Image (tube, rainbow, N blue to C red):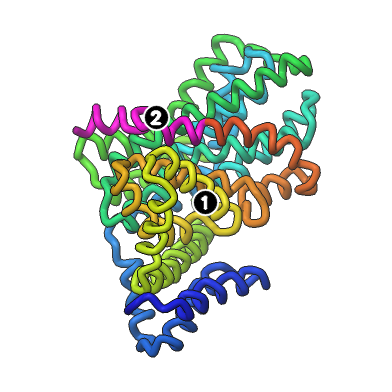
């Protein structure tokens, strides 16, 4: 298919219109693809085939298992154990609860791989606790929402798997490793921000539970984060593929939740399974329709046009990276992560390769950037969940959210301009 301005206008214009009238994004992507195909005289069977092809990638098999493992552990008292574990490490620092909020999101991200799951599970514990200790509700919610972005970077990240598929098979193991240090750096930046505010407003430290209780908390907490260690250890050592490690994680989560801790009865498993299936169905519908949408753009040579336009503005690598980041920050504000990854990857990855950016490094930039969109309106799912859990209006949270958002953007550009931060672990461990 040649570049047709009218077809491109139909594709992008109908999608924008459907989003404006609040059509679910999966349907907006599918309908705009069908309308463009009808105008172009394409057989609609091609759209159906592209949707099916988008779900046939073997790495995507890991996503349902990771979602189920995270769901199992979220239903128990895992979140509470992770909060207690984080308290052992950072609770005695000024503004202890804020520090705990940052660290427990790091731990939980290694279990669930989902920022929204992080906010819903940990937010119900941390937001009320922070309010009781004198933190403002808006800051408690904003910190819970922004720290949850660590989950999209810390392995096992569902979104890294989607990027691997969209980029044509970039190593999932290398992507997981590449996201680890940026995720930790993000958490540290928010801890520094929290400490500055804690000193300014004299937020309290947390009490030490005593050595006997600390040992119990440590053992239970380490068992809880063991699933992340199991996943990464299996992939790095070559014992498991990403899909196999996800299946092993489900078994580990089941044994830990239902047999070792016995937090919930086995009869609840069917409800957990149902919730997981609902989540998987939504994710795969988004992937399938966004794959068709991305194929329509590629067939109409939209990526080539965008690449030509960007490269005509400047040949400087850092200027182009800055422009791409600004573009992605906007995309993240108006589109969910999964379709944004599938659509933006084939457009931007060729440009990144042209200017010498490694696909693994770009994967971290893309996922980190779009993760910030989870915290911003109008499509910030993590923000919406945080406001619902904290029982606050979005406009009440925005001033505190901006305070937390600024260091996140700074870290994003540091990781963008200093690729060794992301690449040191994959280059060292998986040469």
Residue 427 x/y as whole percent: 25, 31
On screen, residue 349 above or below 55: above
Viewer-closest of 360 and 202: 360
Q: Residue at x 79, y 28 (%)?
A: 132
The residue segment tinted magenta is 411-431
Q: Are marks 2 and 1 in contact (CB under 8 Å)?
A: no
**Where is residue 193, by image quadrant?**
top right
The residue where tag 2 is placed is 418
Residue at x 43% of width, y 61% of height: 343
- Residue 224 visible, this orientation: no
- Callout 2 crowding tier (Cα within 10 Å): few <14, some 14–19, many ≥20: few
Query: In the rendered structure, does residue 348 fall within the stretch colored magenta?
Result: no
Secondary structure beneath dot 2 equals loop
Residue 69: x and y in percent read: 43, 47
3D distance between C-alphas at marks 2 and 1: 19 Å
Q: Which residue is mark 1?
A: 327
Q: In this view of the protein, which residue sits in the foreground, 220 or 422?
A: 422
Question: Judging from the image, what secondary structure is the residue with disc 1 in?
Answer: helix
Residue 105, horizontal then vertical, whole percent = 55, 34
Residue for point 44% across, 67% down: 290
């Amino acid at each position: 298919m040649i570049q047709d301005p009218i077809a491109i206008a139909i594709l992008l214009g109908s999608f924008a219109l459907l989003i404006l009238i609040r059509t679910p994004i999966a349907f907006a992507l599918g309908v705009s693809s069908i309308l463009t195909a009808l105008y172009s005289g394409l057989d609609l069977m091609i759209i159906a085939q592209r949707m099916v092809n988008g779900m046939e990638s073997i790495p995507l098999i890991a996503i349902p298992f990771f979602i189920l493992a995270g769901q199992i552990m979220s239903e128990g008292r895992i979140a509470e154990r992770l909060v207690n574990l984080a308290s052992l490490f950072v609770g005695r620092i000024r503004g202890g609860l804020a520090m705990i909020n940052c660290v427990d999101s790091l731990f939980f991200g290694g279990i669930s791989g989902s920022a929204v799951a992080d906010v819903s599970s940990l937010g119900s514990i941390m937001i009320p606790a922070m309010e009781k200790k004198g933190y403002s509700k808006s800051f408690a919610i904003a910190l819970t929402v922004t720290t949850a972005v660590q989950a999209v970077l810390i392995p096992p990240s569902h979104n890294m798997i989607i990027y691997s598929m969209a980029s044509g098979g970039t190593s999932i193991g290398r992507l997981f490793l590449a996201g680890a240090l940026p995720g930790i750096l993000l958490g540290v930046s928010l801890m520094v921000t929290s400490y500055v505010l804690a000193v300014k407003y004299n937020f309290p430290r947390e009490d030490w539970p005593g050595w006997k209780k600390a040992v119990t908390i440590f053992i239970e907490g380490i068992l809880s984060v063991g699933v992340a260690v199991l996943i990464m250890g299996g992939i790095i050592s070559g014992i498991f593929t990403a899909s196999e490690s996800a299946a092993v994680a489900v078994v580990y989560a089941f044994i830990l939740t239902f047999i070792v801790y016995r937090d919930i009865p086995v009869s609840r498993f069917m409800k957990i399974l149902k919730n997981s299936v609902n989540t998987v169905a939504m994710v795969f519908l988004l992937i399938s329709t966004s794959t068709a949408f991305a194929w329509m753009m590629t067939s109409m040579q939209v990526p080539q046009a965008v690449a030509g336009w960007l490269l005509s503005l400047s040949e400087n690598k850092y200027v182009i990276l800055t422009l791409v980041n600004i573009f992605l920050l906007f995309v993240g504000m108006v589109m969910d992560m999964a379709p944004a990854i599938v659509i933006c990857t084939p457009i931007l990855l060729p440009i990144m390769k042209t200017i010498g950016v490694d696909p693994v490094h770009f994967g971290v930039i893309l996922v980190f950037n779009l993760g910030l969109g989870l915290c911003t309106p109008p499509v910030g799912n993590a923000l919406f969940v945080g406001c619902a859990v904290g029982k606050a209006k979005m406009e009440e949270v925005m001033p505190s959210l901006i305070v937390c958002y600024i260091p996140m953007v700074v870290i994003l550009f540091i990781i963008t301009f200093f690729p060794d931060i992301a690449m040191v672990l994959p280059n060292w461990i998986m040469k």
